[in-house]
Image: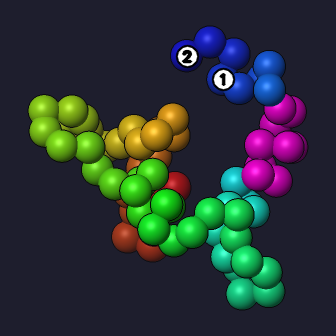
Amino acid sequence: MDSHGGWIASAIDLVRFLLSVEENGTRAGLLKPETLALMTERPPPPHWVNTPTDYGMGWNFRPARSGLT
């Protein structure tokens, strides 16, 4: 985990990208809902067992009651 993406985008650009991947009611998202589900699917055991976070397709995420954080 070197540079955390800083070499491809600024922090502002990364937030803009994240906000644009999912449909928000006023515009279509860049990714299909099926793609988002695949990206955030919990990996099969033994990966990430008993951990508060998951890793899917390059994104580290934390499942929450209201969605993903």
Residue pictured at 18% horizontal, 43% vertical: 44
- Residue type at mark 1? His
User: Residue 12, position in %: x, y?
Assistant: 86, 43
Q: Which residue is mark 1?
A: 4
| Span colored in magenta | 9-17
Residue kind at label 2, given as amino acid type: Met
For image coordinates 72% across by 87% down, the residue present is 25
Residue 12 bears which disc, if any?
Answer: none
Q: Residue 18 at what x, y percent from top left?
A: 70, 54
Determine the residue positioned at 38% across, 70% down: 65
The main secondary structure of the magenta stretch is helix
Quadrant of residue 26 in the image?
A: bottom right
The x, y position of residue 23, in whole percent, is 67, 76
Q: Which residue is mark 2?
A: 1
Viewer-side residue, 44 vs 12: 44
Q: Is residue 35 left or right of residue 38?
A: right
Distance from the alpha carbon under mark 1 to that under mark 2: 6 Å
Q: Quick check: 33 above or below 5?
A: below
Residue depicted at 69% across the width and 16% down the height: 3
State the quadrant of the N terminus.
Answer: top right
